[in-house]
Image (cartoon, grey):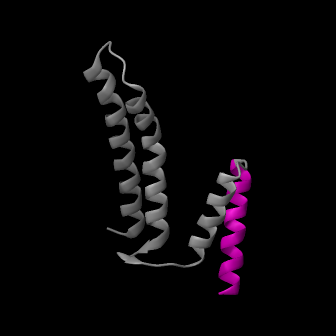
Amino acid sequence: MTGAEQAWLTVALGAVTTFAIRGFGPVTMGGRTLGRRAARVLTLLPAALLSALVVTETVMRDGTLDVDARVGGLAVAALLIWRRASVIWVVIGAAAATAVLRLLF
């Protein structure tokens, strides 16, 4: 299985797992409501899972740590998200930073 196939399989399994986890609560809880803390954890779970996938796919290549220009692009994207930039500017900034770093190194 190629790396791209593994990445898509990971994303698909992550999506199925997230849907299962999110559906499990209402089915088992019935008419009861979750506590504030549990509800907050469930709302943050998809973002945490996606972040973990992005970081893993960015710094891992063939099972080894590979720090290159993509890490710089990811850092710029994180900074722009933290500064509450729009999604288009986050994508443009990350792509530009990655391109500049690849050009320099």
Residue at image point 37% right, 36% down: 19
Relative to residue 66, is residue 36 depicted above or below?
above
Quadrant of the image occupied by residue 103: bottom right
Left/right placement of residue 7 relative to residue 58 reads: left
**Which percent across, then down, holds residue 84?**
70, 48
Q: Residue at x 39, y 69 (%)?
A: 3
Q: Main secondary structure of the magenta part?
A: helix
Along the line of sight, the residue nearer the viewer: 11 or 65: 65
Q: Is residue 2 above or below residue 21?
A: below
Q: Please tell me which residue is depicted at 38% across the width and 62% down the height of the picture.
A: 5
Q: Name, please, the residue furthest toward the left.
A: 28
Which quadrant: the C terminus?
bottom right
- Span shown in magenta: 87-105
Residue drawn where x is 42% and y is 27% of the image: 36
Task: Locate residue 90 relative to residue 17 in the image: left or right.
Answer: right
Quadrant showing the N terminus: bottom left
Residue 68 % position (x, y): 55, 79
Q: In the rendered structure, does residue 103 fall within the stretch colored magenta? A: yes
Q: Nearer the viewer, residue 52 or 41?
A: 41
70 to 37, vertically: above or below: below
Residue 88 covered by magenta stretch: yes
